[in-house]
Image (spheres, rainbow, N blue to C red):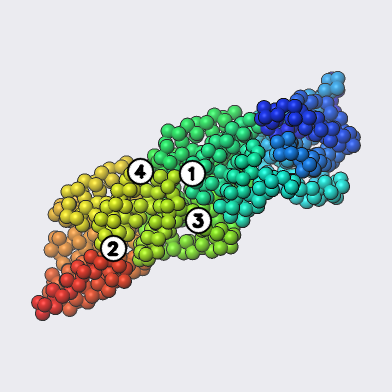
Amino acid sequence: MERRLAAILAADAVGFSRLMEVDEEGTLAALNACRQVIDGLIADHHGRVFGSAGDSVIAEFASPVEAVRCAIEVQQGMEKFNAETPQGRRMHFRIGVNLGDVMAEGGNLIGDSVNMAARLQQLAEPGGIHISGTVFDHVKRKVVREYEDLGEQTVKNIAEPVRVYRVKMALSDATGPDPALISAPALDSGEPAASALSRGHEAMKRHAWTEAFASFSEAGAAVNLAPEDLEALSESAWWNGRLDDCIDTGERAFTGYLEQGNRCRAAVIALFLAEYSYSKLAVSVASGWISRAERLLEDEPEAIEHGYLARLRARIALEGLGDLDSALEHAERASALGIRSRDRDLEMLALHDRGCILMAMGQTEDGMPLMEEAMVAAVAGELGAMTTGRIYCNMIEICEKLADYRRAGEWDEEAKRWCDRVGHDSGFPGICRVKRAEIMRLRGSWEEAEQEARRASGELKELLSYAGAAFHQLGEIRLHVGDHDGAEDAFRQARHLGRDPQPGLARLRLAQGNTQAARNLIDRALMDDTLTRLDRARLLPARIEIALAARDLDAARSDTGELRAIAGAFGSRAFGAAAGAAEGRLRFAEDQFEEAAESLLRSCKLCRESGLPYEEARSRLMLGVTYRAQGTDDLADLEFDTARSAFERLGAKLDARHAAELLSHGAAES
């Protein structure tokens, strides 16, 4: 059996089976027309076809330079063919080129080098060309083209990883064909559907989501969209808050990729569908999509898609199971795959996730720098819009859990600057708007916070868990301004949407005089064994306040100790302020007025440093009560007056009235 060195070109049509189902005769006619172009170009470059099965072609070349030039001209020829062909009969090919030792058996060639070319073709995107490192070494100075190094890839049935390069089609080839082929438009602007698709993709680049959704929908009403177009339509639906449309279109994209034989891309869509299903509180459906993705990827060589699967597993372990060790393991795997595959989005998502997990573990000094590095990449415009939104929302959530609202405010300003730069006409979608509302509320901008929360609740009607969070924020604001009926209604809607509105609802019950109901609610919330220490820190101040109202000093003392320990572990000023306020109230209940005043003064200082005006005013009010108990009425009146002014500025009517009553009572006594 003869052995020789040969360059192998493998080409395969994308979605051939789907096209055959739609129009068998038309598809065969289109394939024959494409084959005439492909076979002619192979002959022009001194190659020969030695394998052909249906929609695939395998050819041999004596020179890798000729093989790559042929591949480029084939893709340019297909671009021209598609520009002149109706939408339903267009064909796209993937191409792989490898150089290596082959065995000749009659007119056929066999061996790993032939198999490698076929595997490279499978890795390529529709209309793309992937070449091996050995081919790249021969062509990099002879075929004028830009190449993207995709790193070492493990491919099925090949023992050793192979270096893979993607041939970029954006630059002209100095040795290529007529420039008219290069500049031929991918879409015929004379066709209404094609024109709508072109407008849709252009709108996506501008982040004009409403325009993109309308354009893709217009095209979809006229023709059957390709999976790539359905995927874009699904994303545009997401940004418009149309979750049902997003899921429906995503399912169609998933089916389309499966029909193309693109199991890896289908798996990525399945992961998106899992996340969307979680947003609808459809946990079983989400689990089904994750299982589908796992099955699709189990026999595939490890690649970027496995990284996105690992990333989703990390988030589930962190947020759903509270299994931090497992979450960190998955995040580290996702990070490694992102770096190896040079996928900047996955790399930064996984880096951010690792930071989140380390923060949950109490390793603030290790976790926050990772999160901030990813956030810098996001607001600098290095990442896709979806990735930027996820990183932003997660960063704000961690800042909220840490009660680090100054940091959250700084990143919020950076995120808005990014929106202005990229032309995102509506800002972040409702999910992120909820988090911005919470920052505004805690920093004292209650009117703006309520506007954001109400807008988010309208945008998120199909995203049940996030809509519940929006109503939770509305309830907290209504409670602060003294509108108990409004707070009750908002908390009720939050509960109906699957969101337990704690600690707000427990505090509302306490304000209504129902201490036992308040205690039952907050105790049940803290029984959740998936809560991290940061989660508990958000609930403990309310439980301490409720325990003191019930005169259960032992419970208040225990919870105050836990809150103080968390504040120390995470270095959080805001938690320190909450711990100081709790300790001040506890010491007052124990008639230790001097120690109470010291703790409350510390709380006021930390509240001011943290930008928490409402919490500072409440600590000042309690400090005034403490001074009065000590008999220092002048100091007490100063604190009451300061608290009253702050409550009035914020719009906290009931608190302002209480402060005024305490102030007038002191004046009457004097």
Which amino acid does the dot numbered 1 rest on?
Leu
* Position of 461 relative to 623 (above/below): above
Camera-nearest residue between 454 and 629: 454
- Residue 658, given in percent of the width and then of the height, sits at 19, 68
Give the CA distance from mark 2 to mark 4.
Answer: 25 Å
Q: Which mark is residue 481?
A: 2
Tell which circle, 1 or 4, labels the residue nearer the N-terminal end: 1
Left or right: where 52 falls relative to 448: right
Q: Which mark is residue 498?
A: 4
Residue 533 in sight in this render: no
Give the CA distance from mark 1 to mark 4.
Answer: 17 Å
- Residue 35, given in percent of the width and then of the height, sits at 81, 32
Q: Nearer the viewer, mark 1 or mark 3?
A: 1
SS for callout 4 = loop
- Residue 8, given in percent of the width and then of the height, sits at 80, 32
* Position of 510 relative to 410 (above/below): above
Q: Which residue is mark 3?
A: 428
Q: Residues within 10 Å of mark 3 (few under 14, many from 20)?
A: some
User: In percent of the image, x 46 and y 36: which residue is there?
Assistant: 286
User: In percent of the image, x 25 and y 44: which residue is there?
Assistant: 524
Disc 2 to disc 4: CB gap under 8 Å: no
User: In percent of the image, x 24 and y 59: which residue is there?
Assistant: 582
Which amino acid does the dot numbered 2 rest on?
Val
- Residue 650, given in percent of the width and then of the height, sits at 32, 68
Give the CA distance from mark 3 to mark 4.
Answer: 23 Å
Q: Which residue is mark 1?
A: 243
Disc 1 to disc 4: CB gap under 8 Å: no
